[in-house]
């Protein structure tokens, strides 16, 4: 048997694994820390055990057993040592990231207030920086501070590591939720061991595995998916600070090349960053041929991102089949599902209109499809089911619902929140009392055995009875103009007078910020979303690069961004809001007598159309199809009603949009109707005495609601049902 392939059947905790590896692989490197590409520190398995036990001895002296211990370190090997020190003495680790000046201090204090740690492990530099705040922030002063810089490794022999069981809580993993109400997931040693076994099975870790990670050490993906995975599999793990990656994304790929890494990855945005940087830097000498598992998770996985990355880096040995989309969450320790190594991602197109109704089916035409990337299949004894979140009944195959998970990796609950824990971690089906499940809060569907994640329940945007996934709207917005940064926008709904309103916040590219026409960018966003999704954006906020609120793993914090928008705390470099829709008054009221020329009709129609589109009338090209401006069905109905009320001419809405009529054509049609005797209605709009094509161009009627209209569309743009 290989030294790496040790027998783990009797291992209760990751400490059992470290002790075994320190005996068998004592001089082999376990962790190496990189700074700007250079090695600045390393630990063998034996050195790690010795240092962790020495820190553990100091923890014992302050009675850390079963207590919560705050880990307050910058990225580095001290973080790894402190984590294992807590494990050794049966303390509950609480990984956090130290604040820079006042940044992140609010979140740190919220976590401390929730977890109530009695002890904090840190460095002398961080302690001296925080000590000055003790008088103003009593909660910091209340903890016992253990400075680990110069702890004598000779103390390792007095560390007592007995008493760890599978049910012993190993750490509190704080999720990237609200700062006001942080939630600490209680992760047991048994959870950690089972999740590592799942990942070994799905990711095919073996004797050749080499790990490179830039992911934050205090986040589950970095801590469990990389640091602890390295220990469990006996693989060398090369670590770098996430700030190093964000400043120089290609340092990540250069490390993969230099150390011939087989396993590395991150959220979708990481791959976009590399592509954008590669266009401006020479890649000479880069070799990605050993990279066999490029995992992509934590945020929506985009097929276009993977295509661009593969296209850019295939010349440097990257294998497109190495992409490994996966799904996970802190409440299930980390890993839930994934694909097949070196088989490539599974990508499917689903009908957009059906997906809005929470069903999936193949589209009839390519332009009607929405591309989703599979998050793979469950592993080992894990069960994944799709459940109606309202009725708690299991969904049929092909129905979208909430993702529920049953697995030994499902954690113990939220620290100090028993009711929320029961609701989230021990949910039961309404028609089946056998067994409990974790409610993930994510929407998804299982199709042909593969799990597809479609969005978050709390992020779902519902406008006029239609479901919209924010990531789809964000993708449309980002593709509308080259000045917008990929993966750096947020769509959400806010309350309106009659219905929910859509808001879009997006970052402007750093190099385009001072040269681009911001109004042009906003107009591009608005038109793209209107034509693709049939929703008119009520507010567009453009912000500077790097200022969009994200979690440490790159997830867009739509809730936090929404709160900042509502409290007017977003630091906008440009804001767009439609002008207030004009009200009918004696000054603006038009009569049939006043509209007796084609020109006056044309001007009046332009004003009517622009007021319902919330744009200036001078933006209306009277010779362009009305469809170019994307009247949604409510606005179209109001437009027709105004014509009928003012002119007494009935224009059936299903005829209004046949043959791509323009304002000019519509004005001519109305002029002819005003001149002709008899009932003032027509079956279609005429131009120069000729009937326009009967081919529907914009609107068709809903089969289930014949009086309800469909959102207008252009060719190659999907039509969406909208209830009015």
Image: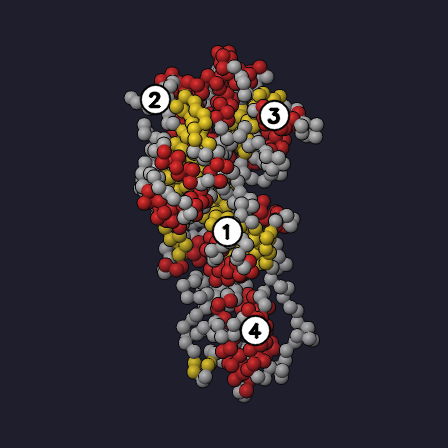
Q: Quadrant of residue 578?
A: bottom right
Q: Position of residue 708 (x, y in %)?
A: 51, 66
Q: Secondary structure at mark 4?
A: helix
- Measured in 3D between alpha carbons, the distance from the residue under mark 4 to the one under mark 3, in whole angstroms, is 66 Å
> Residue tagged by mark 1?
511
Q: Quadrant of the N terminus?
A: top left
Identity of the residue drawn at 41% across and 48% down = 279
Q: Which is nearer the N-term, disc 1 or disc 3?
A: 3
Q: Using residue 701 as the reference point, say whether residue 97 is left or right of it.
A: right
Q: Residue 64 location, x and y as percent?
A: 57, 19
Check if mark 4's residue and mark 3's residue have beta carbons within 8 Å: no
The picture places residue 76, in percent across and down from the top left corner, at: 49, 28
Q: Position of residue 635 (x, y in %)?
A: 55, 67
Closer mark to the observer between disc 4 and disc 3: 3
Using the numbered discs, state the Cα–Cα distance from disc 1 to disc 3 in whole angstroms.
39 Å
Q: Is residue 515 visible?
A: yes
N-term mark: 4 or 3: 3
Residue found at x 34% / y 39%? 285
In contact (CB < 8 Å): disc 1 and disc 3: no
Distance (Cα) linking label 1 and label 4: 37 Å
Instruction: Name the residue tied to disc 2.
Output: 6
Query: Mark 4 or mark 2, which has the lower sequence index?
Result: 2
Disc 2 and disc 3: Cα gap in Å?
39 Å
Label annotation for residue 127: 3
Mark whose residue sits in front, 4 or 2 = 4
């Amino acid at each position: 048997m290989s030294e790496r392939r040790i027998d783990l059947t009797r291992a209760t905790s990751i400490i059992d694994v470290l002790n075994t590896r320190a005996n068998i692989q004592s001089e082999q490197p376990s962790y190496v820390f990189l700074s700007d590409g250079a090695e600045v520190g390393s630990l063998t398995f034996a050195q790690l055990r010795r240092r962790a036990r020495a820190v553990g001895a100091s923890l014992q002296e302050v009675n850390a057993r079963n207590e919560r211990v705050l880990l307050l370190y910058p990225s580095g090997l001290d973080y790894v040592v402190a984590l294992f020190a807590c494990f050794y003495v049966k303390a509950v680790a609480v990984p956090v990231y130290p604040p820079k000046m006042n940044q992140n201090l609010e979140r740190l204090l919220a976590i401390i207030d929730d977890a109530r740690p009695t002890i904090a492990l840190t460095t002398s530099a961080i302690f001296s920086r925080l000590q000055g705040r003790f008088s103003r922030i009593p909660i910091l002063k209340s903890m016992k501070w253990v400075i680990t810089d110069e702890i004598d490794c000779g103390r390792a022999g007095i560390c007592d590591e007995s008493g760890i069981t599978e049910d012993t809580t190993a750490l509190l993993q704080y999720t990237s939720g609200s700062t006001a109400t942080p939630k600490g997931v209680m992760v047991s040693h048994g959870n950690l061991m089972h999740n590592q076994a799942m990942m070994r099975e799905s990711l095919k870790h073996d004797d050749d595995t080499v790990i490179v990670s830039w992911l934050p050490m205090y986040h589950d993906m970095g801590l469990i998916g990389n640091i602890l995975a390295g220990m469990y599999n006996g693989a060398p793990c090369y670590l770098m600070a996430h700030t190093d990656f964000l400043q120089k994304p290609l340092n990540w790929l250069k490390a993969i090349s230099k150390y011939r890494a087989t396993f590395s990855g991150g959220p979708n945005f990481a791959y976009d960053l590399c592509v954008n940087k590669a266009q401006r830097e020479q890649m000479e000498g880069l070799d990605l041929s050993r990279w066999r598992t490029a995992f992509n998770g934590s945020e929506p996985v985009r097929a276009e991102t993977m295509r661009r990355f593969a296209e850019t880096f295939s010349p440097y040995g990257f294998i497109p089949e190495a992409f490994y989309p996966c799904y996970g969450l802190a409440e299930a320790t980390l890993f839930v599902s994934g694909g097949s190594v070196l088989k490539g991602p599974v990508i499917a197109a689903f009908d957009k209109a059906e997906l809005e109704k929470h069903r999936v089916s193949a589209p009839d035409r390519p332009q009607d499809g929405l591309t989703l990337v599979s998050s793979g299949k469950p592993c080992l004894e894990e069960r994944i089911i799709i459940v109606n979140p309202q009725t708690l009944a299991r969904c049929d195959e092909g129905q979208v619902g909430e993702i529920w998970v049953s697995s030994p990796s499902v954690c113990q609950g939220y620290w100090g929140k028993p009711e929320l824990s029961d609701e989230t971690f021990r949910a039961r089906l309404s028609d089946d009392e056998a067994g409990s499940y974790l409610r993930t809060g994510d929407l998804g569907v299982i199709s042909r055995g593969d799990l597809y994640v479609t969005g978050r329940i709390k992020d779902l945007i519902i406008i006029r009875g239609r479901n919209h996934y924010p990531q789809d709207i964000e993708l449309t917005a980002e593709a509308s103009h080259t000045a917008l940064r990929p993966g750096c926008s947020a769509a959400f709904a806010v309350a309106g007078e009659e219905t929910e309103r859509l808001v879009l916040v997006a970052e402007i590219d750093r190099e385009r910020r001072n040269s681009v026409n911001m109004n042009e960018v906003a107009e591009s966003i608005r038109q793209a979303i209107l034509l693709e999704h049939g929703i008119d954006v009520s507010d567009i906020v453009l912000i500077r690069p790097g200022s969009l609120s994200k979690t440490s793993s790159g997830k867009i914090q739509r809730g936090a961004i929404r709160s900042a928008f509502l409290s007017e705390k977003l630091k906008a470099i440009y804001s767009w809001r439609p002008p207030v829709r004009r009200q009918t008054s004696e000054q603006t009221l038009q009569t049939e007598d006043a509209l007796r020329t084609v020109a006056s009709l044309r001007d009046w129609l332009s004003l009517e159309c622009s007021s319902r589109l919330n744009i200036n009338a001078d933006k209306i090209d009277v010779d362009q199809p009305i469809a170019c401006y994307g009247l949604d069905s409510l606005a179209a109905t109001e437009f027709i009603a105004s014509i009928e009320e003012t002119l007494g001419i009935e224009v059936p809405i299903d005829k209004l949009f046949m043959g791509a009529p323009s304002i000019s054509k519509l004005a001519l049609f109305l002029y002819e109707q005003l001149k002709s005797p008899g009932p003032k209605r027509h079956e279609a709009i005429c131009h120069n005495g000729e009937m326009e094509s009967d081919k529907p161009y914009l609107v068709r009627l809903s089969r289930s609601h014949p009086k309800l209209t469909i959102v207008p569309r252009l060719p190659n743009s999907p039509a969406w049902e909208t209830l009015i």
